[in-house]
Each structure stands twice: as C-alpha cells, then as structure tokens.
Image (cartoon, rainbow, N blue to C red):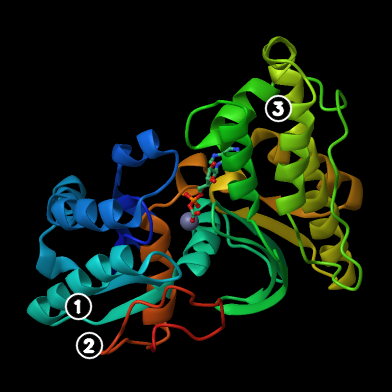
C-alpha cells in the first residue's frame, strides 16, 4: 500500500510517501523564522505552511519517483497542534483526496510519533509496549497492547519535557530550540554537579510535572554570577538534563513492570536526547526489557510517521470524511480521524 502523509501541526511543513514499511521519500521543511523569536509564532507558522505545502508535496512525489495517481491513500495530522497550522494540511489533503478520488485518514500527531518509532524497527515488533512520548508539547506514558490500541497511563500536568529543555535553554542563553543544545553541551558536563528537583507526584505514579524544574534553574542562576554560569555551563546543562530524564526513565520502567510489558518504546523530539537513550538502554538491560529506539530522523516532526500511522488505519478500512476538522487539543485514543 502506498500512502502520502502530510504534517503541518507546528513549525515543520512535511510530506512523505511510504510503501508499507519503506519510506520512498521524506521532505521536511523547518521554518527558520521562529528562532529569532525564541519560540513558534502561530500566525507566522500558518503563513509559512500555506507557502510551502505545495512545493513540499511536489518534491515528495518527485523524490519518490511516482505519479500522484499511483498512491492508494492519504494521511494528514488533524491534531493536536496549532489550529491555523493544522488547517493548512487538513484542507490541502481533503482537496487532493477529492481530486484523486482516493481515501484519506486524519491521524493523531502523537500516534504519528509512535509510528515514527515502529517505522524505525527492522523486525516485526512485539506487544504490549510501554511508550514514553516526549516532545515539545507532550509528555505521556502510553500502554500499547496492539496496533492502534492505546491506554494513556499518565501525562504531564503542566509543561512538557521538551518545553522544559527549551525554556531551560532560553534561561541559559542558548539558541532555540534548547533541547539539542543542552544535549550537546551536557556531553562534557557532570550530571551530579548540582541536584535539580525530580517531581514525584503523590497518587499519580505515571504523571509528570516540569514547571518546577524550570523555576529551580531560574532560582539557581539568580544565585550565581554570569562568570560562574559561563564556567560551569556544561555541568549545569548535564545536571538539568539528568533531572529531566531521571523521572522519565524511572516511571517508564515502573509502568513496564506493573503492566507486564516486555517492550519499551520512546517517541517524539526528546527521544533524540542521547542521555535519555543511554539511561533507558541501561535500565532496560538491567530489567530484561527490549528497547525500541526511533531513528533520529523520525524523532522530531516529520510526515513519514503520519503516513505510516495513516496506512495502519487505512489498512483496517478506516476512512475519514470531508467533514474532518483540525482539533487543536485532540487526545490520543484508539479511534481517530472522525472529527
Ligand atoms: O516532536 P517535536 O519535533 O515537536 C512536537 O511535537 O512538540 O519535538 C520538538 C522538541 C523540542 O522541545 C526540542 O527541544 C526537543 O524536541 N528536542 C530535544 C532534542 N532534540 C529535539 N530535546 C532534548 N535533546 C535532544 N537531542
Ligand atoms: Zn511532534
């Protein structure tokens, strides 16, 4: 089955064509304009998507070397995300599906991240899998019993972990997004240089809270001189990163044990973090668990993951209608593509 996927939920305009588990083409155009504002400006994102969507899709077909009529179906992110950004992809795909007379499916962006991981696996995966979803907008632990079957075990009650990385990066005077920069600087830093807080939430074993971590960094930085900050930058990054990652690893392993899942998977932009990957690898070997790591190119937003998730739905005969809308706060559930 050949599927075109489109992703426009935030600041990446992306299109990809896959044939079952093989990626024929993947085009990701990252909107540079936001970096000078230190965060995504929704209106600018929508305008850039409008400008980029046609050339990006055209390039995806050209790179794959196939004609539009050769696809069997289409898939598009319809939430969660920025409403104006989502609408560009949703309306484009609805129009193209109508013109080509092909079925299409509205994919949940978080489900897309999960399939970005599954797409990276060389062999058939085993279920159940405990998925740790960590991105700029989401932090949640999901029990996946089978394809398209999700139970959310817990999520963040305030900031997402990617947001903690990005806001931390801003406080440290690093560029946007801060996550990759903190990861890079932390490589040569000491994670035990300073102990930042790890939020353990009473009666919420799989919940997260990251707003306190960012505040504790601010308080810490206010207590040291600019010189000290510069001298210890790598150590501060490593300590901050360790606090962010520790809770993720502890709670994910706990979930795997409680739900008797032999597999752990990670997905989303922060799944590219080298310390998280390394810590999870160690914890999984210690606990006899399989770890599914996504390829780095399928961690941050891309359309191949959306095409792959859409393909799974289309294969089951699920099709969205022309009334499909953008749903900015769409929650991950076992059925999507209907609103
Ligand atoms: O999945 P994604 O592209 O967008 C959302 O759906 O939110 O994730 C972007 C997030 C940003 O917060 C970015 O800082 C973070 O992923 N990120 C990282 C790394 N690479 C990307 N965070 C920590 N370490 C990294 N290596
Ligand atoms: Zn994402």
When the figure is inspected, residue 19 is found, relative to residue 247, above or below; the finding is below
Q: Estimate the spatial distance between the alpha carbons at disc 2 and disc 3, rounded to whole Å.
A: 47 Å
Label 1 vs 3, first from the N-terminus: 1
Q: Disc 3 designates what residue?
A: 237
Side of 16 relative to 135 (left or right): left
Q: For residue 70, which quarter of the picture?
A: bottom left
On-image quarter of the N terminus = bottom left
Identify the residue position indicated by label 1 in the image: 94
Residue 93 visible: yes
Distance (Cα) linking label 1 and label 2:
6 Å
In the displayed structure, 78 sits above or below 57; it is below
Q: Which residue is mark 2?
A: 322
Dot 3, how many residues are within 10 Å of its Cα: few (below 14), some (14-19), or many (20+)? many
Question: Residue 213: where, in percent of width, then height?
Answer: 76, 45
Sequence-wise, the earlier of marks 1 and 2 is 1
Are circles 1 and 2 on residues that touch, CB within 8 Å?
yes
Label 1, secondary structure: give it: helix
Q: Please state which of the two labelled residues, at mark 2 or mark 3, is closer to the viewer.
A: 3
Q: Quadrant of the C terminus?
A: bottom left
Residue 172 image position (x, y, % from top left):
62, 27
């Amino acid at each position: 089955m050949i599927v075109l996927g489109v992703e426009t939920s935030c600041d990446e305009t992306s299109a990809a064509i896959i044939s079952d588990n093989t990626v024929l083409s993947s085009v990701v155009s990252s909107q540079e304009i936001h970096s000078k504002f230190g965060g995504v400006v929704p209106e600018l994102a929508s305008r850039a998507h409008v400008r980029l969507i046609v050339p990006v899709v055209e390039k995806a077909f050209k790179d794959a070397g196939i004609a539009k009529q050769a696809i069997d179906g289409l898939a598009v992110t319809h939430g969660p995300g920025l409403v104006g950004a989502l609408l560009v992809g949703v309306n484009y795909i609805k129009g193209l599906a109508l013109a080509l007379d092909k079925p299409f499916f509205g994919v949940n962006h978080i489900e897309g991240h999960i399939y970005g991981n599954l797409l990276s696996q060389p062999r058939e995966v085993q279920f159940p899998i405990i998925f740790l979803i960590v991105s700029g907008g989401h932090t949640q632990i999901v029990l996946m019993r089978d394809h398209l079957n999700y139970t959310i075990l817990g999520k963040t009650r305030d900031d997402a972990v990617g947001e903690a990385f990005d806001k931390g990066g801003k406080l440290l005077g690093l560029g946007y997004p801060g996550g990759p920069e903190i990861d890079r600087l932390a490589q040569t830093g000491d994670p035990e240089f300073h102990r930042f807080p790890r939020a353990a939430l009473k009666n919420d074993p799989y919940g997260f809270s990251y707003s306190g971590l960012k505040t504790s960094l601010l308080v810490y930085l206010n207590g040291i001189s600019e010189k000290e900050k510069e001298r210890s930058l790598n150590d501060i990054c490593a300590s901050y990163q360790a606090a962010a990652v520790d809770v993720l690893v502890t709670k994910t392993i706990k979930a795997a044990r409680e739900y008797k899942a032999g597999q752990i998977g990670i997905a989303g932009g922060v799944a590219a973090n080298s310390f998280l990957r390394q810590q999870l690898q160690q914890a999984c070997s210690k606990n006899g668990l399989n770890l599914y790591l996504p390829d780095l190119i399928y961690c941050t937003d891309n359309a191949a993951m959306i095409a792959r998730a859409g393909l799974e739905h289309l294969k089951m005969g699920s099709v969205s209608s022309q009334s499909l809308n953008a749903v900015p706060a769409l929650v991950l559930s076992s059925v999507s593509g209907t609103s």
